Image (cartoon, grey):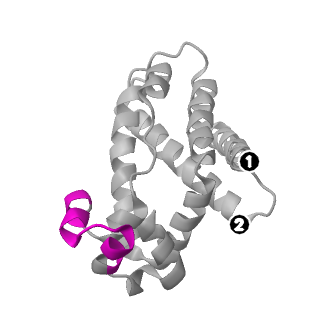
């Protein structure tokens, strides 16, 4: 949190690990015990998909689209608890390529786990991977909408993204 506050105030490029450590009341050595660099400290660890949500998706018995939407709703609900932090992280991500790369690394790991969950529901590994990728992208698109549209909750932003997803899927399956 200290890193985020400093990054929003000064810009992450203008913040040093020594400055972060001093502001947090820790040594630089302690800082590096937890983070590899200031960008990793700024991004932190995004809330991972919960085991409960992954299990519900893995062994769901409803239509896959419904189960995916429930899965997304749970993730957005968790993110809603951290809206001020999301805003600060968004500020950092817009201005720092290295921080964006760190976030992408986290998302790749989450996509792998999600692909594994979905492989229990769909036969084709490429389909499971595509669904996992789209699911993580939907969260990012919902956050983007929330950041850029006044008076739009994260949940409402996700609903808009989901409506677009269903419309896109219909276009892909429409006979030509």
Q: Camera-side residue: 74 or 129?
A: 74
Residue 101 visible in the snapshot:
no
**26 vs 114: above or below:** below
| Residue 148 tag number | 2
Q: Nearer the viewer, mark 2 or mark 1?
A: 2
Q: Secondary structure at mark 2?
A: helix
Left or right of 129? Residue 71 is right
Q: Position of residue 84 (x, y in %)?
A: 61, 59
Q: Which mark is residue 29?
A: none
Our reading of the magenta stretch's main secondary structure is: helix
- Real-space Cα distance between discs 2 and 1? 13 Å
Magenta residue check for 33: yes
- Name the residue carrying label 1: 160
**Magenta segment includes 121:** no
The residue lying at 48 percent from left, 38 percent from top is 131
Q: Residue lying furthest bottom in this view?
A: 14
Start and end of the magenta stretch? 19-34
Does 139 appear above or below 16? above
In-front residue for pair 150/114: 150
Question: Which of the two discs, 2 and 1, labels the residue nearer the N terminus?
Answer: 2
Residue found 55% across the figure and 72% down from its top:
91
Which quadrant of the figure has residue 174? top right
> Which residue of the protein is positioned furthest toward the top in this rendering?
61
Give residue 163's position: percent from left, percent from top.
73, 43
168 to the left or right of 153 = left
């Amino acid at each position: 949190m200290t890193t985020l506050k400093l990054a929003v105030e000064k810009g992450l490029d203008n913040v040093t690990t020594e400055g972060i450590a001093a502001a947090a009341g820790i040594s630089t050595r302690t800082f590096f015990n937890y983070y590899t660099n200031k960008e990793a400290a700024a991004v932190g660890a995004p809330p991972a998909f919960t085991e409960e949500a992954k299990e519900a998706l893995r062994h769901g018995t409803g239509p896959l689209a419904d189960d995916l939407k429930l899965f997304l709703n749970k993730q957005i609900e968790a993110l809603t608890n951290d809206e001020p932090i999301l805003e600060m992280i968004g500020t950092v991500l817009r201005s720092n390529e290295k921080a964006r790369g760190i976030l992408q690394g986290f998302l790749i790991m989450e996509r792998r786990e999600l692909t594994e969950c979905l492989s229990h529901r769909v036969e084709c590994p490429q389909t499971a991977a595509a669904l996992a990728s789209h699911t993580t992208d939907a969260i990012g698109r919902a956050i983007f909408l929330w950041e850029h549209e006044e008076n739009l909750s994260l949940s409402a932003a996700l609903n808009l993204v989901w409506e677009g997803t269903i419309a896109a899927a219909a276009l892909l399956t429409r006979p030509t």
